Amino acid sequence: MRRWWRGRRSAVSSLLIALAVTGAWVIERWGPGLLPIDWSFAASSRLCTLDQVLDGDSLRLHCGGKPVEVRLYCIDAPEKGQPPWGNRSRAHLKRIAAAQVEMRAVETDRFGRTVAEVYNAIGERLSLNLEQVKQGQAAVYPRYCEESRFFRAERKARAAAVGIWGTQGTHQTPWTFRHRH
């Protein structure tokens, strides 16, 4: 047995390394949601209370007794200065957000806000980020998003001409509006 193993040890090691690299690439490319259990969510999620919906892509939460300002990951909603879309987007987020949410932090932005995916903690585990895109209340922010599920949801919303996709204009790309103003 030992003699057999000696000759194959490097081959087995190489195979294990290849599997690890391939698995990491699959998760990076398609996201951890591809796995049957999203372990990254379980490891980094925090139960929080919704304090205020600031606009269509920003919330103020209380997590562990501390206030946290959150920018919703992967999306960009019309600004308040883009009537009526900014107000509609904010109102929609208010309607769908539960009083208790789970926050999965992704990073911190240049303004010190936590960039996160936020899920309702009560009832169905609904991603507020993804729901805003599905209902045409926000666009995918391609500069900061590589997750295909967001792009698929936006394509469907565009095809159905819902929300911001029902009328042409700079409200469809809030980053363009901000750049011009």
Image (tube, rainbow, N blue to C red):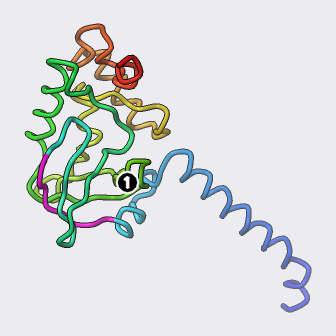
User: Which quarter of the rendering shows the N terminus?
Assistant: bottom right
Where residue 124 appears, x then y in whole percent? 15, 52
Where residue 6 appears, x then y in whole percent? 89, 84
- Whether 51 is among the magenta residues is yes
- Whether 136 is among the magenta residues is no
Magenta part, dominant SS: strand
Question: In this image, 139 relative to 49: left or right?
Answer: right
Residue 107 vs 139, above or below: the answer is below
Q: Say which residue appears at 28% left-offset and 22% top-offset.
A: 157
Where residue 94 appears, x then y in whole percent? 10, 41
The picture quadrant where one finds residue 169 is: top left
Residue 95 vs 25, above or below: the answer is above
- SS of the residue under disc 1: loop
The picture quadrant where one finds residue 73 is: top left
Q: Say which residue appears at 31% left-offset and 65% top-offset.
A: 45
Q: Say which residue appears at 31% left-offset and 46% top-offset.
A: 71
Where residue 176 appears, x then y in whole percent? 40, 19
Query: Outermost residue toward the bottom?
Result: 2
Q: Nearer the viewer, residue 80 or 155?
A: 80
Few, some or many C-alpha atoms within 10 Å of disc 1 (few <14, some 14-19, many ≥20)? few
Query: Outermost residue toward the top?
Result: 168
Residue 105 vs 181, above or below: the answer is below
Question: In this image, 177 relative to 88: left or right?
Answer: right
Q: Nearer the viewer, residue 31 or 171?
A: 171
Residue 150 vs 28, above or below: the answer is above
Which residues fall within the magenta stretch? 45-52
Type of amino acid at the residue the image marks with label 1: Gly
Q: Which residue is mark 1?
A: 112
Q: Say which residue appears at 25% left-offset and 27% top-offset.
A: 79
Question: In this image, 144 relative to 164: left or right?
Answer: right
